[in-house]
Image: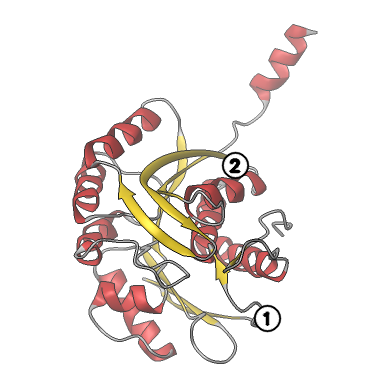
Amino acid sequence: MATDASARLAAEPPIPVVLTIAGSDPSGGAGIQADLKTFQQFRVYGAAVITALTVQNTRGVRAVHPVAPDVVIDQLDAVTDDLPLAAAKIGLVPTPAVAEALAARLGRGALPNLVLDPVLVAGSGDALGAAGTAAALRALLPHATLVTPNLAEAAALTGHPVRDVDEMIAAGRELVALGSAAALVKGGHLPGPPVDVLVTRDGVHRLAGTRVAVSRTHGTGCTLSAAIAAGLGAAMDLLPAVERAVAYVRAGLAAAPALGGGARPLDHRVPTH
């Protein structure tokens, strides 16, 4: 029996390993915790490198304690020395020094199917990145398969206002020109039905949807980028991976539990298709 089981396991394809490089959210709605929940739901193996310890809950962010850049890189090296990564995402980069260390490390060895989620402000409106971090994040763009900014993050990365769909497309094109293979500019903060814009070197895709009636939410950007990374790690093409991830986030929003006294976390248990 043991021999049969060993043979069966050896014949099965290995589970894709997807890495998140992000901050920890002790309330469980965003950051590393949201990413690992998402990876589990998409049936990939999740690994994690922690860039910051945040002190937050659904009501807001009380403090951000960055991890030293060399410790971030040591964690990353420990994972890549041992696990065969199929994809990765980068979320909260708390300081320019951490961004610079990551850029230098990626210059020595790329991460496959890298999704960059330039987390600068929490859903509560509280700042997460230190001054100068947005500019430092630009050095990560040439290493990214996809960058996923919201309107404010796209404006911070490009230096231009992003207030409508035309400006979203322009920002996406500029981010691609800065080195990212593709850009998903998220329009959830625009009035009216939500529209996201996926810009690649081959063209522009508009992803229109319906707005979910939830007043304040927590962890949507983290979950979306993690879901896209999970899709890329499972060998999906970019557009289908983005479309599936958007559908998953909307379902998680619709089922968001009323936990805590502030912004609702998503329900990560919803089906992935």
Q: Would you say 207 lies left or right of 31 here?
A: right
Q: Position of residue 42 (x, y in %)?
A: 64, 49
Q: Would you say 239 lies left or right of 80 here?
A: right
Report the residue marked by disc 1: 213
The C terminus - image quarter: bottom right
Residue for point 42% across, 73% down: 125
Q: Seen from this angle, which residue lies furthest right?
A: 1
Report the residue marked by disc 2: 44
Q: Nearer the viewer, mark 1 or mark 2?
A: 1
Instruction: Find residue 122 and report its image quarter.
Output: bottom left
Q: Would you say 37 lies left or right of 98 here?
A: right
Q: Position of residue 191 (x, y in %)?
A: 53, 91
Residue for point 57% across, 92% down: 192
**Residue 258 tag number:** none
Badge 2: residue crowd in 10 Å (few <14, some 14–19, many ≥20): many
Q: Would you say 39 lies left or right of 256 here?
A: left
Residue placed most toward the observer, 152 or 272: 152
Residue for point 30% across, 61% down: 129
Instruction: Find residue 268 and report its image quarter.
Output: bottom right
Identify which amino acid the numbered label 1 is placed on: Ala
Residue placed most toward the observer, 188 or 169: 188
Residue for point 53% across, 62% down: 219
Identify which amino acid the numbered label 2 is placed on: Val
Secondary structure under badge 2? loop
Residue placed most toward the observer, 17 or 100: 100
Residue 25 drawn above or below residue 45: below
